[in-house]
Image: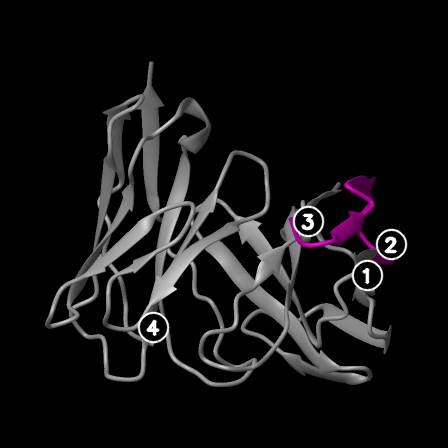
Amino acid sequence: DAKTTQPPSMDCAEGRAANLPCNHSTISGNEYVYWYRQIHSQGPQYIIHGLKNNETNEMASLIITEDRKSSTLILPHATLRDTAVYYCIVRVGPGANSKLTFGKGITLSVRP
Amino acid sequence: DAGITQSPRHKVTETGTPVTLRCHQTENHRYMYWYRQDPGHGLRLIHYSYGVKDTDKGEVSDGYSVSRSKTEDFLLTLESATSSQTSVYFCAISESEGLTDTQYFGPGTRLTVL
């Protein structure tokens, strides 16, 4: 599976957009980009995923560059409850062998 | 939230004792997974199941066994617990095996082996 690189931490002000970057320069054509987050002591929570088009759901937007070597997760109006570790995962499948490999993620701190 | 429960939520045990962790789902999903999470390692897959009585090993399966006799239950057993198995254990479920299937995680079990 392709590896991902994320900065260790970032912060943003409550109510502002949080833009979380991820590099995946070795991604191949059949690999999807997934984002999960983990709020302290809880299980990881699925956020969004995409292949090459930008995606949006009720939680966030995912912007994938045209060459697919990097992506950005956007939380449009961050709240204190969005403080968490965010994991960018590149996943190849299919099948249950298409496991999720969690790296160290990026710690997002939302300040009042 | 996906209907996933884990029991117990916390357990302290002694080295050499057997331990069984239970994952229960109400979503009727086919796939179930056990992960462990340790500082500096992220989440690592222990075992997974792709149907009743169908299981396979993940990347850190040594010292663990699993069983799935019903769709809704996936059991993780430590036959003889060791201190290196002190960890937080997460169960996950997914509906399909496709590239876009999403895994939903349970609340976790914190296990301490003394």
When the figure is inspected, residue A109 is found, relative to residue A21, above or below; the finding is: above
**Host chain of mark 2:** B
Asked if disc 3 and disc 1 are in contact, CB closer than 8 Å, the reply is: no
Secondary structure of residue under mark 1? loop
Asked if disc 3 and disc 4 are in contact, CB closer than 8 Å, the reply is: no
Residue that mark 1 sits on = B80
Same chain letter for marks 3 and 1: yes
Secondary structure of residue under mark 4? strand
Asked if disc 2 and disc 1 are in contact, CB closer than 8 Å, the reply is: yes
Same chain letter for marks 3 and 2: yes
Residue that mark 2 sits on = B17
Residue that mark 4 sits on = A32
Same chain letter for marks 2 and 1: yes
Secondary structure of residue under mark 2? loop
- The residues tagged by marks 3 and 4 sit, at their Cα atoms, a distance apart of 36 Å
Magenta span includes B18? yes
Label 1, residues with CA under 10 Å away: few <14, some 14-19, many ≥20: some
Label 4, residues with CA under 10 Å away: few <14, some 14-19, many ≥20: many
**Host chain of mark 3:** B
Residue range of the region highlighted in magenta in the rendering: B1-20
The numbered mark at residue B83 is 3
Residue type, mark 4 in image: Tyr
